[in-house]
Amino acid sequence: MIEIEHISKRYGEKLALDDISFVVRTGTVTGFLGPNGAGKSTTMRLIVGLDALTAGSIRVNGAVYRDFKAPLHEVGALLEARAIHTGRSAYNHLLAMAQTAEHLVIVGKGRVIADTTVKDFVAQASIGATVHVRSPQAMAVRDALAGPGVRIQSHERGTLVVHGLSSERIGEVAAEQQLVLHELTPQRASLEDAYMRLTGDSVEFRTHVPDLAGGEEILEQAA
Ligand SMILES: Nc1ncnc2c1ncn2[C@@H]1O[C@H](COP(=O)(O)OP(=O)(O)O)[C@@H](O)[C@H]1O
Ligand SMILES: [Mg+2]
């Protein structure tokens, strides 16, 4: 377990970390993400005692890292391993973060901007998303769904794009009216969409490709 409590780090004029707190629980694969310059490397250097805190405290398995007799048995860190993942896009990082990470801590400009499960992160990003409906009775379905707050578009015959209703509600209305549906698909926001939207405001240095540049560290906690 890694407990980070109200840590700050100042390099001269630059406040690299501004009151960051989060917990990495034993057995929970936790992705630590953020745009270039967000403070990921600084945080990880502080965790493994390679740099001194300006304020706050960090405990690894209940103790301060430098007090461990055999620290590499407690935590393993691979910092700035850029060579291993050169050119990996944000999409691929997140694809790797979706398949292995259960929890996400996202930082931007030295602050925590999200501390959430991957599942909730994607669900949150999907709010306001649309539902794709295909029916041989599309016009009748459209009429049955119409109401306040509902917007329905049709880009091709027999299909509807519904804004403002859940797929559950659309299915219920169709059943009540005995209308046949051939497809009922919620359009979920992708993990990358969610990430880009969330971090868009906290990008300090933009690279020409949407790369997580700096998200190349791997922090591994021994069991
Ligand atoms: N040794 C340092 N001296 C001055 N500023 C630094 C130093 N290390 C990092 N910074 C600054 O702290 C901020 C966070 O950097 P860093 O932790 O490397 O971000 P990330 O790893 O998320 O890309 C950046 O603005 C960076 O320029
Ligand atoms: Mg870095």
Image (cartoon, rainbow, N blue to C red):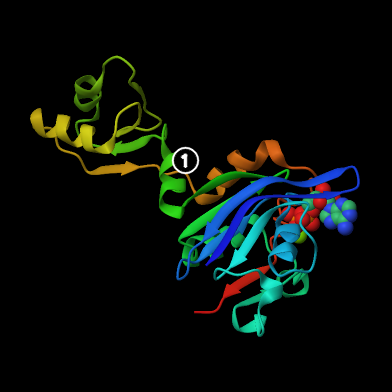
Q: Residue at x 52, y 67 (%)?
A: 1
Query: Residue 192: where, in percent of width, then height?
Result: 56, 50
Q: Is residue 175 above or below residue 72?
A: above
Query: Residue 3: where, in percent of width, then height?
Result: 57, 60
In the figure, residue 94 lies in which quadrant? bottom right
- Front in this rendered view, residue 74 or 79: 74
- Inspect the image, locate mark 1, and give the three-letter code of the amino acid beneath it: Ala
Residue 46 appears left or right of 129 = right
Residue 164 appears left or right of 136 = right
- Front in this rendered view, residue 83 or 183: 83
- Front in this rendered view, residue 131 or 14: 14
User: Which residue, given by chain and number where applicable, does mark 1 sit on?
Assistant: 125
- Front in this rendered view, residue 120 or 96: 120
Q: Residue at x 48, y 57 (%)?
A: 103
Query: Residue 14: where, in percent of width, then height?
Result: 86, 44
Q: Is residue 34 above or below residue 68?
A: above
